[in-house]
């Protein structure tokens, strides 16, 4: 694979031994941090300066491995329009959606067409994302690589217990109507940790359901003390979501229900190490919650399997695979 430090990145990697010794992390320009305070456009201006910094130092590297954030996208634009000394780019954290406004959709389409012209590949967290992205955007499906996500609990302390309640939480891609409707006919307490009030507009929240915005620490504490965990995801999104949440619950040995058969199938074997339900299927969700809450033996079986399954997904291994795949894509692109 050649000498070390052949890869430049905009992701720090927490000094991981599978990452930091092999890649050069180029930090953002701290002296431009005040730009972020400018309303509406500050973050974009900051990202432009960061992209320019990345662009200036790209020459000595074989591969550019970038999170597909605003700075990463701008870097791709610079390479596309300036024509000289182009470097192969592999993008990860590709969290794309289709905007309902046609004008914004076509603008996004153009953006992705541009970065695709200068990239050697893209990673996704679920197999279905590659299918979705390639059907909507002008990227051949062969340029996508599925790299499953991982639990993120190694830096935190928590105590596992069972306080006889159902926990759910998170904001992104969530749909809590299905969970609240299921809870109305069940005799159990529910705690939903969510800070987006818009997700509960017009909903009649029963007495056995508590909705509260909590700190990240409190979120983990509630997850660790719950009997079961429900990741109430909405359907209709271009990409899958909730990976970190349900993998953390699985790592805590919690029987976990995910309302996303499409995206979670890469992580959960239905009925063995978790339960998969189609989004919006309130009857199945209600019956599954009831069954798990009543059956301690089943909870123990699924929880133990879930913990073992979660151990297959490791952050350090993810980073190692990310850089190795980027280098393989680079070697293949030369042929």
Image (cartoon, rainbow, N blue to C red):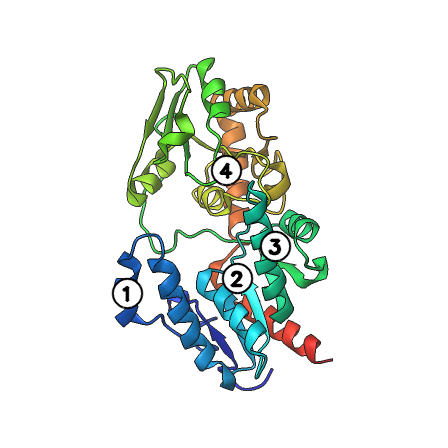
Q: How many residues crowd mark 4 within 10 Å: few (<14), some (14–19), many (20+)? A: many
- Please name whichever residue, 195 or 202, is drawn nearer the observer in this view of the structure: 202
Q: Position of residue 305 (x, y in %)?
A: 55, 41
C-alpha distance separating marks 2 and 1: 30 Å
Q: Circle 4 — which element?
A: helix
Q: How many residues crowd mark 1 within 10 Å: few (<14), some (14–19), many (20+)? A: few
- Please name whichever residue, 273 or 206, is drawn nearer the observer in this view of the structure: 206
Q: Residue at x 57, y 83 (%)?
A: 84
Q: Is residue 76 above or below residue 302?
A: below
Choose top left, top right, bottom left or bottom right for residue 335. Answer: bottom right
C-alpha distance separating marks 4 and 3: 42 Å
Which label is found at residue 303? 4
Report which residue position mark 1 lands on. Answer: 33
For marks 3 and 1, give the one nearer the viewer.
3
Report which residue position mark 3 lands on. Answer: 109
Q: Is residue 70 above or below residue 331?
A: above
Looking at the image, is mark 3 or mark 2 earlier in the sequence? 3
Q: How many residues crowd mark 3 within 10 Å: few (<14), some (14–19), many (20+)? A: some
Looking at the image, is mark 1 or mark 4 earlier in the sequence? 1
For marks 2 and 1, give the one nearer the viewer.
1
Which label is found at residue 318? 2
C-alpha distance separating marks 4 and 2: 23 Å
C-alpha distance separating marks 1 and 4: 44 Å
Looking at the image, is mark 2 or mark 1 earlier in the sequence? 1
């Amino acid at each position: 694979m050649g000498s070390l430090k052949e890869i430049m990145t905009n992701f720090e990697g927490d000094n991981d031994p599978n990452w930091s010794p092999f890649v050069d992390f180029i930090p953002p320009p701290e002296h431009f941090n005040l730009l972020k305070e400018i309303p509406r456009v500050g973050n974009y201006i900051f990202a432009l300066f960061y992209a320019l910094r990345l662009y200036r130092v790209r020459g000595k590297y074989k591969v550019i491995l970038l999170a597909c954030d605003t700075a990463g996208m701008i870097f791709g634009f610079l390479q596309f329009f300036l024509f000289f000394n182009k470097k192969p780019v592999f993008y990860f954290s590709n969290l794309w959606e289709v905007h309902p406004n046609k004008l914004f959709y076509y603008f996004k389409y153009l953006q992705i067409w541009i970065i695709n012209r200068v990239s050697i590949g893209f990673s996704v967290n679920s197999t279905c994302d590659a299918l979705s992205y390639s059907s909507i955007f002008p990227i051949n499906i062969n340029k996508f690589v599925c790299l499953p996500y991982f639990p993120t609990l190694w830096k935190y302390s928590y105590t596992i217990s069972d306080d006889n309640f159902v926990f759910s939480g998170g904001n992104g891609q969530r749909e809590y109507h299905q969970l609240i409707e299921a809870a109305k006919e069940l005799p159990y307490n529910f705690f939903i940790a969510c800070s987006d009030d818009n997700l509960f507009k017009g909903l009649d929240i029963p007495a056995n359901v508590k909705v509260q915005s909590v700190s990240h620490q409190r979120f983990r504490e509630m997850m660790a003390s719950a009997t079961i965990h429900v990741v109430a995801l909405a359907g209709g999104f271009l990409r899958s979501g909730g990976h970190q949440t349900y993998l953390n619950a699985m790592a805590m040995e919690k029987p976990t229900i995910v309302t996303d058969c499409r995206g979670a199938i890469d992580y959960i074997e239905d009925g063995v190490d978790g339960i998969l339900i189609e989004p919006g299927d309130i009857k199945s969700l209600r019956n599954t919650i009831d069954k798990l809450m009543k059956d301690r033996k089943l909870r123990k079986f699924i929880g133990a399997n879930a913990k073992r399954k979660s151990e297959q997904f490791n952050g350090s291994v993810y980073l190692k695979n990310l850089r190795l795949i980027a280098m393989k894509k680079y070697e293949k692109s030369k042929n």
